[in-house]
Amino acid sequence: MAAAVVVVIYGMQMMSVLLVPFLVAAFLALITVRPMLWLQAHRVPSVLAALLIVTMLMLILVVVGAILGTSIADFTAALPTYQARLDVLNQQAFEFVVKHLKVDESTESMSDMIDPGFAMALVAGILNGLRDVLTNTFLIIFTMIFILLEAGTAKTKFQAAFGRSADSLQGARDFMQNLGRYLGIKTLVSMATGMCAGLLTWALNVDFPLLWAMFAFLLNYVPTIGSIIAAVPAVLLALIQIGPGAAGATAVGFIGINLVFGNFLEPRLMGYGVGISPLVVFVGLIAWGWIFGPVGMLLSVPLTMTLKMALENDDRTRWVAILLGSERDAEHALRERERAKAADQATSS
């Protein structure tokens, strides 16, 4: 089994050129399937409903791509200047520490190990990776259209192919509905987070506010860790461009935005947390990023959520889902086990 897992992971990495556009199309379809089903419920033909949804999505992608394309190119061109300035600030900070605190030479050598410009390079790498994926826009859009067209007939096809009743497909249907609901709410919250981050950086006169808005939107799909990664480069740029005051204001603003949306609004809308252990979130970020590149990092939590939900729907693999889940999930599983044990004892007595 372990060897099979290694082979599957290696195969996914080798096929990432084909799998990444398909994954993007599948997640876009899950986000937009509810509006399409709503249109169908109001007597809009399936083909027309799918085309309307895809046309609106294409218009959004074209507008956002046109606006951000220039920002990404300008930021990439200015990146060496920013990194050089960061290196100077880093060296000045360590010289101040060595001079006034009188530390030894080993502490001074740490300045060579710390690279604050890595955060800026990470931003450029993720955005350029996303731009490379969007070069396959037509493949993504056509795949999404066919997925949406199949959504309405999937139930009938599964029943005819496998001879299962509607009740036996309830678990799979609940899984897809929960995943689609999670992605839909997460997307709306991420859009609001990105807009607030863009307004914040624009108000503080930080360069490339649209870029930081998009970055905050994308990384909001990664709980806790994503918010930190999204804030660091904006704070560093505010420090380079304006000064410590603007950097502090940017940091406080990002903290406030994520407290409001991440800790207050999002749990109320969803009714539950992400349901994944923070350690699993971090490991998943590294693992999916290694398999699928920058897009895998952005989709790491939805992919891990998909894996966890799929494992929960099978009694043989539910224990793996519990290990991947949060402490609340483990406590809930313990309560369910105790209730089942109490029921068995009552029956036997």
Image: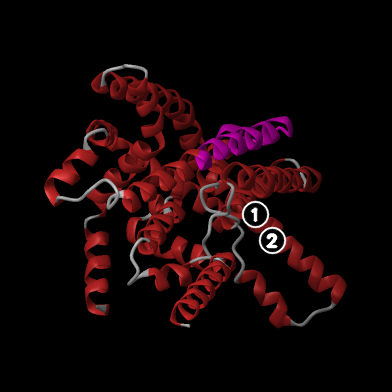
Front residue of 12/235: it is 12
**Residue 199 belongs to the span the image colors magenta:** yes
Q: Which residues are magenta?
A: 185-211
Task: Describe the element under mark 2 as helix, strand or loop.
Answer: helix
Q: Amino acid at mark 1?
A: Leu
Give left or right: position of 25 versus 91: left
Q: Amino acid at mark 2?
A: Asn
Tell me if residue 6 comes above or below residue 135 in the rendering: below
Q: Pointer 1: residues within 10 angstroms few (<14), some, or many (20+)?
A: many
Residue bearing mark 1: 86
Q: Which mark is residue 90?
A: 2
Taking the spot 30% from the left edge, 36% from the top edge, the residue there is: 135
Q: Pointer 2: residues within 10 angstroms few (<14), some, or many (20+)?
A: some
Taking the spot 64% from the left edge, 44% from the top edge, the residue there is: 268
Taking the spot 48% from the left edge, 45% from the top edge, the residue there is: 182
Tell me if residue 4 comes above or below residue 188 in the rendering: below
Is residue 178 visible in this depiction of the protein? yes
Tell me if residue 330 comes above or below residue 43 in the rendering: below
Front residue of 18/44: it is 44
The quadrant where residue 293 appears = bottom left
Circle 2/circle 1 CB separation < 8 Å: yes
